[in-house]
Each structure stands twice: as C-alpha cells, then as structure tokens.
Amino acid sequence: MLRRIVIAGAGQAAAQAVQSLRQGGYTGALTIVGEETALPYQRPPLSKAYMKGEMDEERLYFKPAAWYQDNNIEVILGAHATRIDRAARQLHIEHGGVLDYDALIIAAGSRPRKLPCQGADLAGVHDLRTLSDVERIRPQMVSGRRMVIIGAGYIGLEAAAVACTMGLDVTVLEMAPRVLARVTSPVMSDFYAHEHTAKGVKILTSTALSHLDGTDGHVSAAVLADGTRLPADIVLAGIGILPNEELAKDAGIACANGILTDRDGRTSDPHVFAAGDCASRPLVHYGRTGRLESVHNAIEQGKLVAAAILGLPRPAEDCPWFWSDQYDLKLQIAGLSTDYDTIILRGAPESRKFAAFYLRNGTLIAVDAVNSPPEFLASKKLIMTGAKIAPEILSDTTIPMKDIAATAAA
C-alpha cells in the first residue's frame, strides 16, 4: 500500500509525474522537493521568449500554487536532497529534514558544464539553465554591448539569436569544425551558420578558449588559444550539461552517464525511480540505452514512472522529438540521427523551408525540419514504424507528406 510518494526534483518530469499520479487515482501523500525557490516551470523559453522579455514569469509555471494546494501536493522549495537511506526508505534533505517514502522518484535534472579555465568565476560570466540565471543575464543584455558565447549548440545559438536581435555584438566560439556538430549533419550546420552570419553574428569554429581576463572583478575579454583577445562585456557558457546522478550514485544505485532505469523508469532499487535529464533509459526505437535532454523525454518518463508505481498499463513510448527557435526559424527534430548513412533533402535550404531526412540501411531514423511541420509530424510516425521509403519519394515536394506517410503505413 502506497502511503507516501516523494519526488526529488521540481522540473518538467516532476511536474508530469505528480499530475499523472493524481490522474491515475493516487490519493496518498505526495511531496516534491526542489532546490530552486520557484514552482516547477518550463525551461525552453528561458533561452528564447523569456530572455527577450516576451513572456511573463507566471506563464513559465506548469501549474499555479493553488493547483498544488487543491491536489494536496506538498511542495518543499529551496531545499537540497542530501541522501537516500534505502534500507529505511527515507530521503534526507538539508537542515535535518527527513521524508519517509514508499516510492521515490529522482527527477533531479542536470547542470551546466563549467568552463574549465581561468576567469570562469568573474562577474559577467554566466550559465543559462535556470530562471535565476536569466534574471542575472537580462539586465546586461543592452544594445551595443559585446557578448561572447562559448559553445555553438542549441542553447548557444538560441542565445546568440536573442542577443543579436536585441542589438548586442555577438561572437560565438566553437571547438568543433562546425556549429551543432554533436547534434546534426553538416547540411544543417552550414544552414544555421549562414543564417547567423547574415544577421551579423560572428562565428569562430575550430577555436579554443584559453582563458578569460577581467577588470575590477568583471570579465573584459575572452583570450583564445592562439592569443587573440576578444573584448567581452558578457560571456555565456553553453558547453553542455551533466546529469545530476550523485544522489542515486551515493546510495549505491546503478549509474552510467545518468541513473540507469528500465523502460518504466525503475532503477536498480525497485522502490526508486528516475525520470528526465538525470535518467539513462532504454531507447526502444533504437535498440540502445541513453539520456534524452528534452521536454518530450521528461513528459514521457513522468507518465511511465507514475503508471509503473500505480500498477497501470505502460503508456505509449513515442519517437524522441526536440525543437529549437532561432530568429524566425523553427527547427523541429524527430528521432535520433546518430549513425545515419544517407541524407535526403526535401526542399532547398535557401528557401528557409526544408527538411533533412536521415536514413540508415534505407530505414528512416530521424528528420530535421525547418519551418516544415508536415515533414516533422509525418516523420514521427514513420520513424516509429521503421519505415523504408525510397529517397526519390522523400525528396519529391509534389507528393504531400501525409500521402507518403499513408502509403508507408498501408
């Protein structure tokens, strides 16, 4: 009998889990423990609309405070979970608090990788992960100021787009030979590099940062490995994230670049579950295990964990999906393009409305769709069914995507 379920973490996965638990009929005690002082909120807008001041803070929250009260959910904010006592089934939180649990969900999320260089602790050097990060950055986003962004992944390029639009002088540094190198193909990298350059963003690839210099404790320049000095009023680090797995690892729960779980989010301890960025889960459509850093993954795992705890049927496992907004470009990604052997373009990149399909051994495994919702939506279904589609059909823009999907399903 479940008397109390505790969730360590207060992000998207936690928000979905509590909602699914209540919708699934659980009426027992339910507690969320979050390190931040804000109620569970959306993170994607932080590097987009919220940073630009186009979204109010209240719109970030998944649910208002009254919803948690009405659903009898205890929310403990500004509290760090310090230890799991698996034998006693207790979660210890700082300042001596102890919470008994019958089931524990670790939804601790992830944290930014820190710049491993001198000057990383100077004022004006920022990460972009939390609401408080944006609150520190926004007052400094003043037209004419010089911003150096370390890392040309999605966060770095989204921030570059916002800063450029706000009138800042933006330079992006990337150690890899192209932008978005870890997440997409050269075709998409070239397209986005061209778009940013056309807007005035300076992109330096194959470029290493040596250190940051400061004046009176505030960053003043980024110094490259070759000695080049780039004046900087603001520096933003976007060099990836690390899973917050320490709580589980210290308790002896199996971890390997994330907390290892089965399809239902259950860890090596049957009373402990994990969901979201901190979890490494089976990727059923790809036959391997991995972490997915996405809204889709957090929502899906929140539902899976809730169902498993309540003994309900397993919810459907969707094709992984992601998105990125930069300028007036909406990039929608379905699937994982790792190990593709063929790229098929549908439409021309110069039209700013096109899609890149990724195939392996003739099977569609992923798509990057720029301003092309039909290609994204159809591909999600095709990827889940392991569809094989002739390249000449995929590339033929005279054939509607819905017809391609219908033919493949027949």
Image (spheres, rainbow, N blue to C red):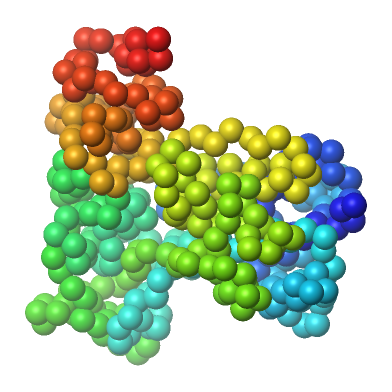
Q: Position of residue 9 (x, y in %)?
A: 65, 62
- Near-viewer residue (12 or 305): 305
32 sits to left or right of 284: right
Q: Quadrant of the C terminus?
A: top left
Q: Quadrant of residue 285?
A: top left
- In this picture, is 16 found above or below 174? above
Front residue (pair 372, 260) = 260
Report which quarter residue 168 is drawn in: bottom left
How many numbered dots are placed on residues in this image? 0
Please report the residue visible at 14 percent of the width from the left and 59 percent of the height from the top: 177
Left or right, residue 153 beside residue 378 = left
* Relative height, residue 378 to residue 72 (above, below): above
Where residue 13 appears, as percent x and y from the top left, is 62, 51
| Residue at 58% in and 47% down | 263
Residue 372 appears in the figure: yes
Residue 32, by quadrant, is bottom right
